[in-house]
Image (cartoon, rainbow, N blue to C red):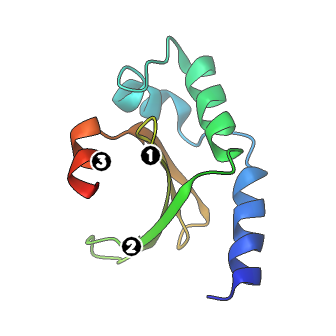
Amino acid sequence: MSPEVMDALLVRFRRTDSVPELAKHFRLHGKLCEATDEVVYEQMMLEHLRRTDLRVATAISTRKRRERMWFLVAVDSGLIAQYNETADRFWTFYRQSRQFFEVLA
């Protein structure tokens, strides 16, 4: 992927204005993200996406459809926004354990 295509994709990510299936994802991940309610959880994700220091990783899901996934990772906080390129939407927002990042260091 060229740097220009990557930059355009990141600009598109940063223009996101909502979390899909907000209630579901807040229920699954809100507590670990230290969000007090759905509004705070959504605001956390939107602020996360606007960071300029995120690490970007990609992977193909192991599910039957083999979707192309993007992970926008804040190493300092462990917060990750996951984008499903195949479905063209953000998939979820969660916090990974600090132990995970210690293994990578």
Name of the residue lying farthest toward the bottom: 2
Mark 2 to mark 3: distance in Å? 17 Å
Q: Secondary structure at mark 1?
A: loop
- Residue 98, percent from left and from top: 28, 37
Q: What numbered label is drawn on residue 59?
A: 2
Residue drawn at x 69%, y 57% as measured from the top left: 13
Q: Quadrant of the C terminus?
A: bottom left
Residue drawn at x 63%, y 19% as measured from the top left: 39
Q: Is residue 63 left or right of residue 3?
A: left
- Residue 20, percent from left and from top: 58, 43
Q: Are marks 1 and 3 in contact (CB under 8 Å)?
A: yes
Q: What numbered label is drawn on residue 75?
A: 1
- Residue 77, percent from left and from top: 45, 34
- Of badges 2 and 3, nearer the viewer stands 3
Q: Which residue is mark 3?
A: 101
Name of the residue lying farthest toward the top: 36
Name of the residue lying farthest toward the front: 105
Mark 1 to mark 3: distance in Å? 7 Å
Front position in the image: 24 or 97: 97
